[in-house]
Image (cartoon, rainbow, N blue to C red):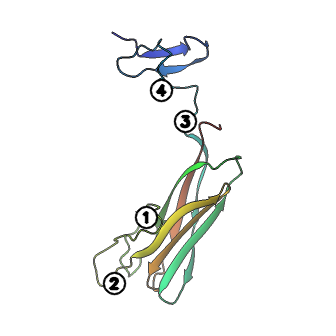
Amino acid sequence: MAKRTRIGPHVTTGEPGVYISHPGVDVDNVAVPYMLDSRYKNLDLFTYGVVGMNRMNAVSETVYYATVTIPDLGYQPQFYANMVYASDNVGGIPVNSAYWPASGVTFYVNQSNNAYTPLYTGVWMPNRTTICAQSNIDQNQVHGNMVLYYVVFKNPESA
């Protein structure tokens, strides 16, 4: 039976850590990459936050938008973000409903005569230091607030 877990020094480098091998592979077999190797910084948290999104009423739609500036890590970091509608309104958008970022995707919101459907919704990083979010919602009668939640991670290779 294979030993799969080592908490302590690495078998060849002596570097302390947590090492877990794949099923059927002994943790002392360094020819096979580990399933978990604490020497590598996977998804180290860099920064996170929440910001209110600005609202602009256009002729046929309401546009929510936000921009967040983060410090430059010297590379494009991994990030996750979510826009949340945080107010009640007559249009039927559920309070605290989340729109997961997916540029160019139309989301089904609510089945009613006065429901508003996001037309263009997305969160993206155009460069290494800026997170942008935008949601265009059909109808300019929306009066609620939308917020952007974001989490930025350091890349394991660059941390």
Check if mark 1's residue and mark 4's residue have beta carbons within 8 Å.
no
For mark 4, give the secondary structure: strand
Q: Are marks 2 and 3 in contact (CB under 8 Å)?
A: no
* Mark 1 or mark 4, earlier in chain: 4
Q: CA distance from mark 2 to mark 3?
A: 45 Å
Q: Position of residue 11 (x, y in %)?
A: 54, 11
Residue holding disc 1: 99
Residue indicated by mark 4: 36
Q: What residue is at 35 percent from the left and 17 percent from the top?
A: 24
Residue type for callout 4: Leu
How far separated are the C-alphas under marks 1 and 3? 26 Å
Give the residue pinned by disc 3.
42
Q: Quadrant of residue 20?
A: top left
> Residue, x 41% and y 78% (percent of image)?
89
Image spot of residue 46 (x, y percent): 63, 45
Which one is closest to the eye, mark 1 or mark 4?
Answer: 4
Seen in the image, is 48 located left or right of residue 101? right
- Which amino acid lies under the numbered mark 3 shown in the image of this protein? Asn
Residue 116 numbered tag: none
Alpha carbon distance from label 2 to label 1:
19 Å
> Element type at marker 1?
strand
* Residue identifier under label 2: 114
